[in-house]
Image (cartoon, helix red, strand yellow):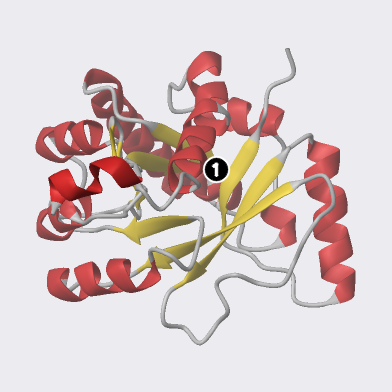
Amino acid sequence: MVEAYYDLCIRYAPDDDASRDKFTSLVKYFGFIGAGITEVADKGNTPCRNLNIPNFDLVHGIEIREDNPSKLHSQASRYARKANFLIVQGGEDKLNRSAIETADVDILSLPLGIKEGGFDHVIAKSAADRGIALEFDVGSLIRYRGGKRVHAISELGQRLMLARKYEVHMILTSAARSIYDMRGPRELVALANLFGMTKEEAIKSMTATPVTILKRKRKSSNYIMDGVELIEEEICTEKQEEFC
């Protein structure tokens, strides 16, 4: 069976014909069946760009970067219907807990080197309970060298252990900031192995998990949450009087 690979959190958007053609050629050459272009909220950009690739599932995400929990909630509500998925860039404990409790958030992305808090057992359990995925951005392993790379591998490994323990959904992504950061599934699996992710976990993080997120967001407007859906029942004319 051919796996349906996605690089769901690309932080790069081609903005002219040449870069669009190169982007299209690369994602297809790498063997992805879909990719997500993620743009930062409130930066004057157009989250849902007019970019389509034939026979390719190109989706758009919005990344919220907001330290104020109340503003985070309002931004999530504002952008929930303007993109295919929402990411929140976390940080310290308070912000991460707020992100996990915010409706419509699909993915929590954590920068490296968080000194206070970050990803602990409380946040891991809450993320698992609410079906929010944790992004494993291996872009740092592509760009960093020396001691900085060693620290990145260690930190990602610690997050992986907690994600495993509490069965948190994981998203593996290149988080490419330019076309030169993009990598194929085979390379992403190899990079993830550096911090302990198994081949099976890495594949699931690029196939089943992104597919589940997109399927959930593409459900009808009657969708409330997994297992709960609003059903409109038609009432025949003869029985309408019973409900008056």
Residue 85, given in percent of the width and then of the height, sits at: 46, 54
Residue 128 in view (yes/no): yes
Residue 135, given in percent of the width and then of the height, sits at: 41, 43
Q: Nearer the viewer, residue 89 or 81?
A: 81
Q: Identify the residue shown where x is 83% and y is 43%.
A: 28
Query: Which residue is situated farthest in the front direction here?
Result: 238
Residue 6, given in percent of the width and then of the height, sits at: 63, 39
Q: Can you say whether 58 is above or below 199 in the image? A: below
Q: Can you say whether 53 is above or below 226 in the image? A: below
Q: Identify the residue shown where x is 15% and y is 57%.
A: 98
The quadrant of the rendering that contains the C terminus is bottom left
Q: Which residue is mark 1?
A: 173
Q: Can you say whether 35 is above or below 165 in the image? A: below
The quadrant of the rendering that contains the N terminus is top right
In this rendering, the count of numbered labels is 1
Q: Nearer the viewer, residue 167 or 218?
A: 218
Residue 174 in view (yes/no): no
Q: Nearer the viewer, residue 225 or 3?
A: 225
Badge 1: few (under 14), some or many (20 or more) residues near its Cα, within 10 Å?
many
Q: Identify the residue shown where x is 29% and y is 36%.
A: 131
Residue type pointed to by label 1: Thr
Q: Can you say whether 148 is above or below 44 in the image? A: above
Query: Which residue is situated farthest in the bottom direction here?
Result: 44
In the image: residue 243, left or right of residue 74? left
Residue 5, given in percent of the width and then of the height, sits at: 66, 32
